[in-house]
Image: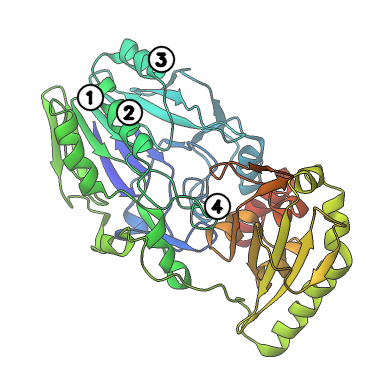
């Protein structure tokens, strides 16, 4: 068997009689058009081998790319989790031969046995890694899954010592900047990745997925989002479990896997290669300059129209909408003093609410802030019009929030745990529900469907 890394989490896995493609992302930019593959990839689309089966691990946009799925042929088999939105998108794109993946339920295709491995993710939809066995060797692609000792044990019971594994190495902190959370390597999570490899004890392991970066005006987020580098991980892995062989595995590299061992062939693919070795652009430096929020609308008359619409919404509708949410009691219980700041190209406007008093909206500052939301005028305008979603608004840092919530009484003070997420008013006013999530994908379906 051999695996070729196309980019990020996209692998082409070839046995003697079967070709498998996983989580394809063929085009840049992707994921709300704020990310590109990193390192930069040169992919010759007309040379990508025909494949027998397409495997999708989960719904995140860096794994479930609508543009690529619209481009690919639709007549082959697709294996995907039982996620209604994901399945509806596939159907809308013209995929009809779709089989739903189930935890540890093997699927036989030609000479391959594919076994989805579960994740304990907290997302409200399923996610799977994948075991691939060709009768001789066994390969595991962990993708983004979070696994327990029982899952590792079950994998070992199926195939003993795995021959090759694409394992997690990158803690996912890309939203921490926006939500004022710790900008550091989360040591417990990072250690868990090393411990999974130690417990699994494959013969060979390479760092998998996490091959992208932010681009253009969002590029400053690279300094705050990717606390571990692939080279860092393999150096740590070599010391943590020296019995497991390891190597970098870049786009265009091929791993030849046999009972005799694993051979890494750098840049040996005839259809994909590293176009530019620019991984340093995603280097973690959380003390670097922070890019300010600005509206993304540049035409002056349009800016004024959008700001007028946003102002009307804030002053005429926002507070009544907040009072209808179940979180209104939480804000009043904690006597939260809320500031909303809306950014234009130059400057910003501020509104405030003291939930501990009359919960009356006021233009300007109150003098105390313990619940803050800042957002670009362009993005709040689009939220009001149902033209965007929190995946973009939050991930692009066009929205930022923090809380320092406490409540005082006579001789007493009570603190809300800083590590816990406190309900943000705008996110309650425009909830990220199934309707918003579905529209996010269907917008791309309408754009790219051929």
| Between marks 4 and 3 in the image, the one whose residue lies nearer the viewer | 3
Chain-order first, disc 3 or disc 2: 2
- Left or right of residue 110: residue 405: right
- Residue 413 in picture, x, y percent from top left: 66, 43
What is the CA distance from the residue labelled 1 to the residue labelled 3? 16 Å
The quarter of the picture where residue 220 lies is bottom left
Dot 2: what SS?
strand
- Point out which mark residue 66 bears: 4
| Between marks 1 and 3 in the image, the one whose residue lies nearer the viewer | 3
- Point out which mark residue 150 bears: 3
- Left or right of residue 83: residue 271: left
- Left or right of residue 433: residue 171: left
* Residue at 37% over, 48% down: 210
Q: Which residue is nearer to you in this view: 270 or 194?
A: 194
* Residue at 17% over, 50% down: 268
Would you name the residue on which mark 1 appears?
Answer: 202
């Amino acid at each position: 068997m051999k695996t070729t890394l196309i980019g990020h989490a996209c692998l082409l896995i070839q046995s003697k009689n079967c070709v498998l493609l996983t989580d394809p992302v063929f085009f840049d930019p992707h994921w709300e058009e704020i990310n590109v593959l990193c390192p930069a990839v040169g992919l010759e689309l007309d040379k990508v081998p025909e494949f027998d089966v397409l495997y999708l691990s989960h719904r995140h946009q860096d794994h479930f790319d609508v543009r690529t799925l619209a481009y690919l042929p639709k007549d082959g088999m697709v294996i995907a989790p039982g996620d209604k939105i994901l399945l509806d998108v596939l159907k809308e794109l013209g995929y009809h031969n779709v089989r739903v993946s189930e935890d540890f339920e093997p699927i036989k295709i030609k000479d391959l046995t594919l076994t989805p491995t579960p994740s304990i993710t907290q997302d409200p939809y399923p996610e799977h890694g994948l075991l691939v066995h060709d009768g001789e060797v066994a390969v595991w692609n962990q993708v983004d899954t979070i696994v327990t000792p029982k899952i590792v044990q079950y994998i070992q019971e199926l195939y003993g010592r795995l021959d090759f594994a694409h394992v997690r190495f990158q803690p996912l902190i890309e939203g921490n900047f926006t939500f004022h959370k710790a900008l550091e390597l989360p040591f417990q999570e990072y250690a868990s990745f090393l411990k999974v490899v130690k417990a699994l004890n494959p013969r060979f392991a390479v760092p998998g997925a996490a091959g992208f970066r932010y681009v253009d005006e969002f590029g400053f987020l690279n300094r705050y989002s990717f606390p571990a580098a692939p080279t860092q991980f393999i150096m740590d892995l070599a010391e943590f479990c020296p019995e497991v062989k390891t190597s970098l595995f870049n786009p265009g590299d091929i791993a030849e896997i046999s009972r005799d061992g694993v051979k890494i062939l750098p840049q040996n693919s005839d259809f994909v290669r590293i176009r530019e070795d620019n991984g340093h652009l995603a280097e973690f430096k959380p003390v670097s300059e922070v890019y300010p929020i600005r509206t993304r609308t540049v035409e002056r008359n349009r800016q004024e129209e959008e700001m007028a619409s946003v102002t009307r919404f804030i002053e005429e509708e926002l507070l009544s909408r907040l009072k209808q949410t179940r979180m209104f009691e939480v804000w009043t219980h904690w006597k939260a003093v809320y500031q909303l700041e809306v950014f234009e190209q130059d400057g910003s406007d501020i509104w405030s609410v003291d939930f501990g008093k009359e919960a009356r909206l006021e233009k300007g500052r109150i003098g105390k802030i313990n619940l803050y939301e800042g957002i670009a005028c362009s993005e709040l305008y689009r939220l009001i019009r149902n033209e965007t979603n929190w995946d973009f608004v939050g991930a692009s840092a066009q929205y930022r929030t923090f809380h320092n919530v406490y409540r005082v009484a006579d001789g007493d003070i009570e603190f809300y745990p800083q590590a816990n997420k406190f309900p943000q008013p705008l996110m309650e006013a425009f909830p990220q529900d199934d309707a918003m999530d579905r529209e996010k994908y269907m917008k791309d379906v309408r754009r790219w469907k051929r």
